[in-house]
Image: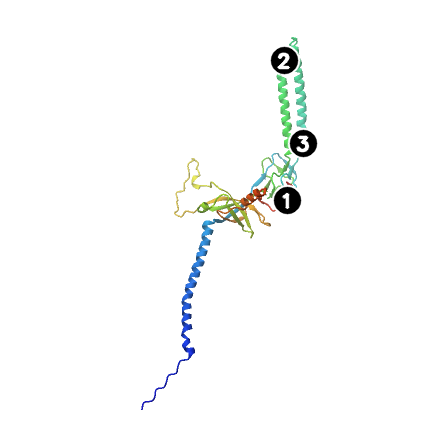
Amino acid sequence: MDEPKRAEPLPDLDDRAEPAPRATAKRRVRILPVLVTLAVVSLAAVFGRAMWDVYFRRPWTRDGTVRAYIVTMAPEISGRIVELPVVDNQLVHKGDLLLVIDPTDYKIGVSRSEAAVRHAQINAQKITEEGQRRRKLVAQHAVSVEETQVYESDAAAAEAQYQQAVANLNQARVNLERTQIRSPVNGWVTNLLTQRDDFATVGENVLSLVDADSFWVDAYFEETKLHAVHEGDPARVKLMGYGQLVHGHVGSIARGINVANAQPNREGVATVNPIFTWVRLAQRIPVRIEIDRLPEGVVLVAGMTATVEIDPGAESPSARGDRSGERDGRSGPQTQATANSSDRAAER
């Protein structure tokens, strides 16, 4: 006899519900790469846009240098230096005494010139009076006309000698004043090598000053970026030694740089390099950045390295300050060239 078939057990409810979560997990696994790809593409687009703005819309360069005018002090007279009241790197103001040259010889020169003036004046007066007396005697036929003319000529020559003596006196007084050399600008004494008792020679530099009110930044931009640089555009300057940003604006763009092929030889013709490379490097053009605002604690030194970024189309802080000053009836903010500008302003 055939054995009766056993009934198969019904599947558990938990076992029947198990395939659904597995399918959902598989779908999630398939969607995850798509989401990751979309996120990476989005980040790449944002990063690419930012890099486009940095390199094309906002030109920048790391080739920047802080500049300042250097005033060289050369005496206009010769002599031994008897006073040197300044030291290296000292801040001086306009009109401060820098050094004194021995004035002894020049005081004597003034005394001699004064004596020469008095002598020439007396001599001219005497000859003039004699000429006038001779002129009166001509009508009485006491003297000849020729003698009268001689005295008149001598009187004119004596007057000329007097004027020359006066000029020599003025020159002697000027030379005496030049024994004291004073600062023509506000600035710092730099690289002072002159010492007291040194002999100063006419025209030879004895002292140099860094003009405190003349600081600017020269940014050397590639010529491919000049199309986005315009006068008045605001600029941000990052000094290598400081974390603060120095704000300024484009003051001007240089209109010429050295051209090697244009240099003439001894015959006066152009010297042209016969080697022409296929790889052409963009020339760097100096762009002058005027400083509008200097953060507190930042010390500018001529020659410092700087990174400069230009923001085309924006408005510089100086322009905004000028307009706000016009609305308020006041002038715009002045350029802060040094940390002690307030002291100089108070002195002025």
Give the mark toward the camera: 2 or 3: 2
Q: What residue would you read off at disc 3?
A: 107
Examine the image and state in which quarter residue 90 appears.
top right
C-alpha distance separating marks 2 and 1: 69 Å
Residue 323: give x, y in percent of width and height.
55, 43
Q: Which residue is painted at 65% across and 30% down in the image?
A: 173
Answer with left or right where residue 229 lies relative to residue 139: left
* Amino acid marked by disc 3: Lys
Examine the image and state in which quarter residue 41 appears.
bottom left
Q: What residue would you read off at disc 1?
A: 343
Q: Examine the rendered structure and indicate whether residue 14 appears above or below residue 188.
A: below
Q: Examine the rendered structure and indicate whether residue 104 appears above or below residue 56.
A: above
Answer with left or right where residue 165 lies relative to residue 1: right
* Amino acid marked by disc 1: Asp
* Amino acid marked by disc 2: Thr
Answer with left or right where residue 239 lies relative to residue 56: right
C-alpha distance separating marks 3 and 1: 36 Å
Q: Residues within 10 Å of mark 3 (few under 14, many from 20)?
A: some
Q: Which residue is painted at 63% across and 21% down in the image?
A: 159
Residue 7: give x, y in percent of width and height.
37, 85
